[in-house]
Every structure is written in structure tokens, then in C-alpha cells.
Amino acid sequence: MNKGEAIVANKMKNLNVKDKLAYVFGKTLGLMILIVVISLISLTYVSSRVKTFYQTSYNNVKLAIQSQANLQEGAKNMLHACLVQDAEVTPQRLEMARARFQDMTDLLQELSQTSSADAELFETTLGNMEQINSRFSEFETPSLAYDSEGAFRVYNEVYLGLFAQMAGNITSITEIEDAKAASLYTSANVIKWICFVLEVLLAAISIIFASGLSRVLGKMLGDGIYELKTSASEMSKGNFDIKINYESADEIGELADTMRQMLDDTRTIISDTSEMLEEMANSNFNIHAKMPERYVGIYDRLMQSIRKLNYRLNETLQNISVASNQVSTGALQLAQNAQALAEGATDQASAIDDLTNTIENVTSMATESAQNQAAAAQNVSRVAKEAAKGKEEIGRLLDAMEKISSTSKEIENITVSIEDIASQTNLLSLNASIEAARAGESGRGFAVVADQIGKLAADSAQSAANTRDLIAKSLEEIENGNMITKNTATVLEEVLNSMNEVQEIVKDASTASQSQADMLKDIAENIEKISSVVESNSASAEENSATSEELTSQSDSMNSMIEEFRLRQ
């Protein structure tokens, strides 16, 4: 950093960031305004020079040139009027010369108002112009009279000298105006280059100054921000053994002060909490924070958590101490109860042995009863099976009787058919006898045959009637047999149902007897288990007695260890 930058940095040191930016912006803006002002001044000056050149010098030169041209045109028209003796052309040329001289007079008067030439020169020139106009009649008279010699004489004696003097004066005025125009152009050009160089110089100065300001500002802000960023990065990694050197009156400086304070508080809090936790690790719970005023915000929550942990552990250890004393007392009572339990368990074992013998006798009797019930159930089951077979035979008999009854009905139907055939045969025999009677002698043999057929039909009808009567009697007997068979089947079925019920009852009784025997066996087994449990309880009671003594010893040892902690009162 050079001397100028050091001066600027010293000026901006106590400014905040906003004022620093405003300072840099103001200085840069001032240089830019200065450049703009100089540019405007130079442009105004050049514009003024150009306007003066155009409106004055250029116009004056133009008026002088026009005056010179009018002088030449006027002289030429006068000479033309002398040479051309024409009634139409001569007056016209004279009028044109007069008009030129009048225009020239007006131009010179206008030029005298703005020209930089000497006033005396204009007085002489205007005086000559007045003579030219006033003595024009001396030339006009001989010219209109077509007196060429007289007109030339007047031209040579009067106008030639005036024209020469006028031409010289106008030339002088033109040269003066040309010189002034050249001066205006030169000065404008010089001013232009001066302004250009000045603007370039100011632009370079502005760039250098702005660059220096930017560099100073960037260094002032960038160094602080970089240092704070680096510090924050180290803090995020858990490194609080760092130092922040940046100092300034701006916001970054305030942030640096805040971070320094935060680092100091954090280091203090970490050191304080570490010492308290280390004291608790060394069995000292009677601890206090050295600087509780530093625990603010989220650190207060940390302090509260440490206090809760301290109080909880302290309370837990106190409760353990109380519980240890209670365990010691309970262990002594447990030893006494265990001894009493062992004695009771011995008495229970003797009573259970007696109960086991009784249960074994009952189980033996129940088992024998269950076996007898099972044999009875088997006999009833066998009888029921035989009855079921008889029922099946009766069923087959009923089926045979039904078939005989059906067959008898079919025979009855056949008998009816035979009676119908006999009736039809008898009718045919009757018809044949009638036809034989009609035939007379020739039909006598046929009448004998018809008579025999009629007898055969009558015998067949009688046999069919006898057969029907026999079948009817057989059907009645079969029906009676069916009724008896059905009644027998019904009675047999009722007997079979009763036997089935008896079988179920015997089976249930056998099952109940067997279940009772099984239950008695289970009771015997459970009693054996109870006996083993009682024996085990007796052994456990003795072990509990030994364990309670060991527990009392351990409780005393625990009390000794707890006494090593320094607890809060």
C-alpha cells in the first residue's frame, strides 16, 4: 500500500461500511462530475468559437467577398455602358451598376457593425462609397448621351481611383476577417486539444484514484471478511484457540468484536464446564460454576443440563446409599425368613409323602374300575353289532315280502286279463253260433265248434275266478306277514337304539373312569413335582440364607464406595 492509499485508508478507518462505500462513490462521482464539467465547458467554448466563426468572421468574410464582387460587377457594368451605345442596353447597365453600388453600401454598413477591422478604415471605405454613389450622375449623363469619351474620362478621373482604393480597403477588411477566423479556428483547436488532454488526464487520474480506492476498500473489507471467515471455519471445526486481529469502526469491526467476545465466552464456558464435569468424574458432586453470568442464551441451557445431571447423579447416589442400607436390613430379614422357610419345607415334604401314598392307592382302584368299564363297553358293543345284523336281516325279509306282494298283484292283473279274454271268447262263440244258425245245415259243424269254444271260455273264466280268489287270500296273508315283519323290525330297532344308548353310557362311563385314572396319575405326578419343588425350595432357602449374608456384605461394600463421593447436602 503506497502513501496515498495509506492516507485514504486512514480516513476510511473509522467509517462504517455504508459510509466507506459512500466515500468511494462520492470521490469517484466527484471526478466524473469534474470530467463532465470540463467536457461541457470545452464543448461550450468550442461551440461558442464555432458560432462566432460562423456568425461573425465567416459572415464578415462573406460580406467582404460579396462587396468585392459587387464592386467588380458595378465597374464592369459602367464600362459596358460606356462601350455599348444602345438605347435599351445602356440604361439597363447603368441601373445594374447603381444597384450593385447600393447593395455594396448596405453590405459595408452591415459589415461595419460586426467587423473587427479599424473603424477609420470603414469610415474611409464608406466615404469612398458615398462619393461613388453621389457622383454617379457625372458618369450617367455622358453615358446616356452616348458620349463615350466623356464617360471614360469621368470613369478614369473619378471612379478608377475610388475603385482602386475601395478594392484595397475591402481586401484589407477581408484579410483582417480571415486572420480573425484563423485565430478563432486556431484557438478553438487549441482549446479542443487542451480539453482532450485534460479529460484524458482526468480520466487516467479517475481510474487510478478509483482503482486505489477500490483496492483500499477491498483490502479493508476483504481482509476483515477473510479473517472472520477463516475464524468461523476454525470455530466450526471445534478450534477456539484462535485470535481475531481485525479492528475497525465499521460493521465488520463490530462483527469482529462480537466474535472476539463470543470466542472469549465460549473458551471460558468450555473451560468451566470441563472442570465441573472433571470434578464429577473424580467423584466430587459439590461443584459450582465460576462465572455463571457468562451462561446466557443457549449456554444457559447447557448450564441447566449440567445442573440437572449433577442433581440427578447426586440424588441417584443418595438413593443408592439409602437403598443399600435398606438392602442390608432386608438381607438380614431374608436370611431369617429363609431359615424358617427351610424348616417349613421339611415339614411339607413329610406331608407330601403321605399324600403320595394315598393318591397311589386311589389311582390303582380307579384304574381297575376303568378296565372293568372298558370290558362292559366291549360286551355291549358286541351285542349291539349282533342286533344290527338282525335288523339288517329283517330289512331283507321286508324287501322279499314287498316283492311277493308286488308279484301277487301282477298275477291278479293277469287273471283279470284272462277273464277278459274268456269273456271275449264267449262273445265270439255266441256270435259264431248265431252265424251257424243262419247258415243252416252248412253251418252246423261250425256251431259245434263254437259251442265247444264257449264251454272252454266258461271254464277259463271259472278257473280265472278261482285263481283270483286264491291270489286275494295269498295277498291278505302276505299283508299280514308284512305287518308282523314291520312290527318285529320296529321292536328290534327300538331294542337296537336302547342298546346303542347303553353302549354310549357304558362308553362314557369307561371314558370317565379312564379320565379319572389319568387325572389321578397326573395328580400323583404333580404331587411328585411339588415334592421335588418343596425339596428344591428347601435347598433354595438354604442358598437364600447364604445369599442374603453375601448381599449384606456387598451392601456394606457399596456403602463404603458411596462414602467416597462428595455429595450435595
Image (spheres, helix red, strand yellow):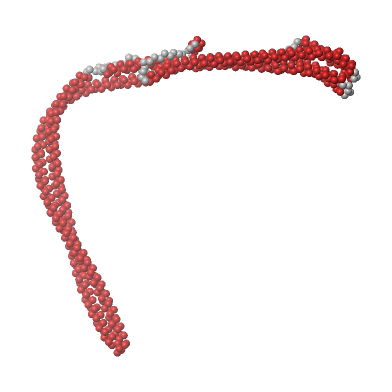
Tell me the residue at 78%/10% (across/down).
Answer: 120
Tell me the residue at 86%/14% (across/down).
Answer: 156
- Name the outermost residue toward the bottom: 441
Number of marks in picture: 0
Quadrant position of residue 461 = bottom left
- Side (left or right) of 479 relative to 106: left
- Side (left or right) of 289 relative to 485: right
Front residue of this view, candidates 90 and 530: 90
Measured along the vertical axis of the image, is residue 236 above or below residue 365?
A: above
Front residue of this view, candidates 132 and 441: 132
Residue 168: x percent and y percent?
78, 13
Tell me the residue at 87%/16% (across/down).
Answer: 152
- Side (left or right) of 42 relative to 243: right
Measured along the vertical axis of the image, is residue 95 above or below residue 457?
A: above
Measured along the vertical axis of the image, is residue 265 above or below residue 397?
A: above
Front residue of this view, candidates 262 and 484: 262
Residue 169: x percent and y percent?
78, 12
Front residue of this view, candidates 448 and 302: 448
Tell me the residue at 14%/26% (across/down).
Answer: 546
Residue 158 visible, this orientation? yes
- Side (left or right) of 322 relative to 538: right
Residue 130 visible, this orientation? no
The quadrant of the rendering that contains the C terminus is top left
Residue 319: x percent and y percent?
24, 22
Residue 314: x percent and y percent?
26, 20
Quadrant position of residue 52 = top right
Quadrant position of residue 132 = top right
